Image (tube, rainbow, N blue to C red):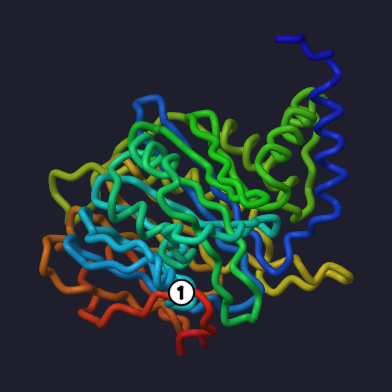
């Protein structure tokens, strides 16, 4: 293999930076990080930046549920092998979640996403159910990657209640610290698989984000200065630096009223501090930058101990749910934690979920109104 000139990565990075300047984050922006402590504890942080109220709710979905990929006549279908705790967008699709094996999936905006047109007879899955398919069917990142590499189906997007297509890419992590990023670029599925892929934001595509990151490393940016705008490329660099700067000791602790159970809330709060540091202030309005969106909520998912912490940026609500406390057996009821309307919770909210009829996943070719 021909050796590259030493300046080649910097050239690619500069091209990436220039390209990024022509791809604003549109009306949405998010950040995802993966933290691995010295003792092996794995925690995934995610922020949701959106141009309006996303009408998110939290749902408990048990095993054994019949699922349709909502892809029309050639849609895939399956029965869920694993129960999950998810957060929805507009109550028409899974924006992220954790299953009972500690596999975490996060869906983030990527304006360059191009899913291509399926060939005749190709199986299809709607973007609204893509993350749920992974949570329902897999225990590890490696298992999910092996399945999706087969390309037994093709993802197709859906029109959001905002009237825009849901152009997204997807990240996943598991209790081993394994990680993967999935993007559809020019109709092709691109997979970045490995523990080194700890940070994901939005535009440009992931290859260019990695090149931009190399530029900042070579330029001394991680020790001398950091880019400070709300653009995805800048958030990528800052999140990478902050993730490496926080303590790597997990320091388990016991919680009053929960005897015999260790929790890793200090590590979770460290990751939460990173997510807050790369967030966009609520209600921000930047002249000539309508694509800048406020951070509206964050999640911190302890893959190892199967705990999800939710942090609202719009209401005084920071609470957590332990998946081991949920009833995920086949036939167990679907449950919902109402977040829409500024509901505020604190502490362990497992007893605040109520039985509910499952929302309808969005299907291809239809338009949807936001949840009330």
**Residue 301 visible within the image:** yes
Does 194 appear above or below 289? above
Q: Percent from the top left, x then y, of residue 261?
A: 18, 45
Q: Percent from the top left, x then y, of residue 292?
A: 75, 65
**Helix or strand or loop: what does disc 1 sit on?**
loop
Residue placed most toward the observer, 37 or 141: 141
Q: Is residue 59 left or right of residue 10?
A: left
Which residue does the numbered mark 1 point to in the structure image? 56
**Quadrant of the frame with the N terminus:** top right
**Residue 274 visible within the image:** no
Q: Which residue is found at the position 37% from the left and 42% from the top?
A: 147
Q: Percent from the top left, x then y, of residue 283?
A: 69, 74
Which picture quadrant has residue 345? bottom left
Q: Which residue is found at the position 22% from the left and 73% from the top?
A: 334
Q: Is residue 158 left or right of residue 290?
A: left
Q: Percent from the top left, x then y, of residue 254?
A: 24, 45
Does 362 appear above or below 106? below
Could you classify mark 1 by the number of other residues whose Cα lies within 10 Å: few (under 14), some (14-19), or many (20 or more)? many
Q: Is residue 349 left or right of residue 178?
A: left
Query: Total of numbered circles in the picture?
Result: 1
- Residue situated furthest front in the rendering: 120
Q: Is residue 76 left or right of residue 190?
A: left
């Amino acid at each position: 293999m021909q050796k590259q000139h030493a300046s080649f990565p910097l050239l690619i990075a500069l091209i990436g930076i220039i390209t990024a300047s022509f791809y604003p984050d549109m009306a949405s922006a998010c950040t995802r990080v993966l933290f691995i402590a010295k003792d092996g504890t794995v925690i995934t942080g995610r922020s949701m930046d959106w141009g309006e109220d996303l009408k998110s709710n939290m749902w408990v979905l048990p095993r054994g549920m019949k699922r349709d990929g909502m892809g029309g006549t050639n849609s895939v279908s399956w029965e869920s092998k694993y129960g999950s705790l998810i957060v929805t967008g507009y109550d028409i699709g899974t924006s992220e979640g954790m299953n009972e094996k500690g596999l975490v999936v996060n869906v983030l905006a990527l304006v360059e996403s191009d899913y291509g047109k399926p060939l005749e007879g190709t199986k299809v899955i709607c973007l609204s159910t893509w993350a749920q398919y992974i949570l329902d069917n897999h225990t590890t990142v490696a298992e999910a990657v092996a399945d999706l590499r087969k390309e037994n189906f093709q993802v197709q997007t859906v029109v959001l209640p905002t009237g825009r297509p849901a152009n997204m890419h997807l990240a996943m992590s598991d209790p081993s610290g394994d990680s993967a990023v999935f993007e559809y670029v020019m109709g092709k599925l691109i997979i970045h698989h490995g523990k080194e892929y700890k940070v994901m934001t939005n535009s440009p595509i992931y290859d260019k984000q990695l090149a931009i990151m190399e530029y900042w490393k070579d330029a001394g940016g991680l020790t001398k200065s950091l880019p400070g705008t709300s653009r995805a490329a800048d958030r990528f660099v800052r999140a990478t630096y902050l993730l490496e700067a926080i303590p790597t000791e997990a320091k388990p602790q016991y919680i009053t009223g929960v005897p015999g159970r260790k929790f890793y809330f200090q590590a979770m709060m460290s990751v939460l501090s990173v997510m807050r540091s790369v967030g966009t202030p609520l209600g921000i309005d930047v002249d000539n930058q309508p694509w800048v969106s406020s951070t509206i909520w964050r999640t911190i998912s302890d893959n190892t101990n199967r705990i999800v912490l939710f942090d609202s940026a719009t209401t005084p609500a920071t609470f957590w749910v332990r998946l081991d406390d949920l009833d995920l057996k086949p036939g167990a009821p679907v449950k919902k934690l109402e977040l829409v309307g500024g509901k505020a919770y604190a502490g362990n909210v497992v007893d605040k979920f109520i039985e509910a009829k499952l929302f309808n996943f969005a299907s291809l070719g239809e338009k949807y109104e936001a949840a009330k």
